[in-house]
Image (cartoon, rainbow, N blue to C red):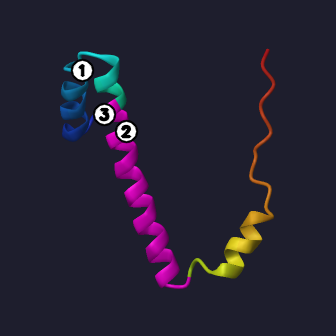
Amino acid sequence: MKLLDSQIRLLGVISRIKSEEEGEELCRLIQKYYMEKLDEEIDRLWANGTLTEEKLEAMSKEHFRVPSRKRD
């Protein structure tokens, strides 16, 4: 699998981390980015009617866990 240029640039940034605190801060920034993307997608789904109060209620009653695989 070939890395994207943006992935290579991120590896360069990661290689400059000098402390656990810097690494944690970078992780928080990346998490914040993806949380914002998730919020945008939820807003879009709500606006176009894909996500509704009824669907949220139905999802709250679903069981989404996948059985764990047995380890040898």
Mark linked to residue 5: none
Query: Which residue is labeled 3 in the image?
Result: 26
Specify whether 71 is left or right of 32: right
The answer to whether one can see residue 7 in this image is: yes
Which portion, as a residue range, is magenta? 25-49
Query: Which residue is labeled 1 in the image?
Result: 17
Circle 2 packing at 10 Å, graded few (<14), some (14-19), many (20+), is few
Label 1 is placed on what type of residue? Ile
Q: Tell me, yes or no, whether the two marked residues, 3 and 2, touch with CB atoms within 8 Å.
A: yes
The image shows residue 62, relative to residue 55, as above or below, that is above
Query: Which residue is labeled 2 in the image?
Result: 28
Q: Tell me, yes or no, whether the two marked residues, 1 and 3, touch with CB atoms within 8 Å.
A: yes
Q: Main secondary structure of the magenta part?
A: helix
Secondary structure under the numbered disc 3 in the rendered image = helix
Question: Residue 5 location in percent, x, y?
Answer: 19, 38
Residue 61 figure quarter: bottom right
Question: Residue 15 location in percent, x, y?
Answer: 22, 19
Q: Residue at x 28, y 25 (%)?
A: 22
The image shows residue 4, relative to residue 46, as above or below, that is above
The answer to whether one can see residue 1 in this image is: no
> Of callouts 1 and 3, which one flags the residue occurring earlier in the amino acid sequence?
1
Residue 10 figure quarter: top left
Circle 1 packing at 10 Å, graded few (<14), some (14-19), many (20+), is few
> Of callouts 1 and 2, which one flags the residue occurring earlier in the amino acid sequence?
1
Q: Residue at x 30, y 34 (%)?
A: 26
Rounded to the nearest angstrom, the CA distance separating label 1 from label 2 is: 14 Å
Q: Residue at x 72, y 67 (%)?
A: 59
Rounded to the nearest angstrom, the CA distance separating label 3 from label 2 is: 5 Å
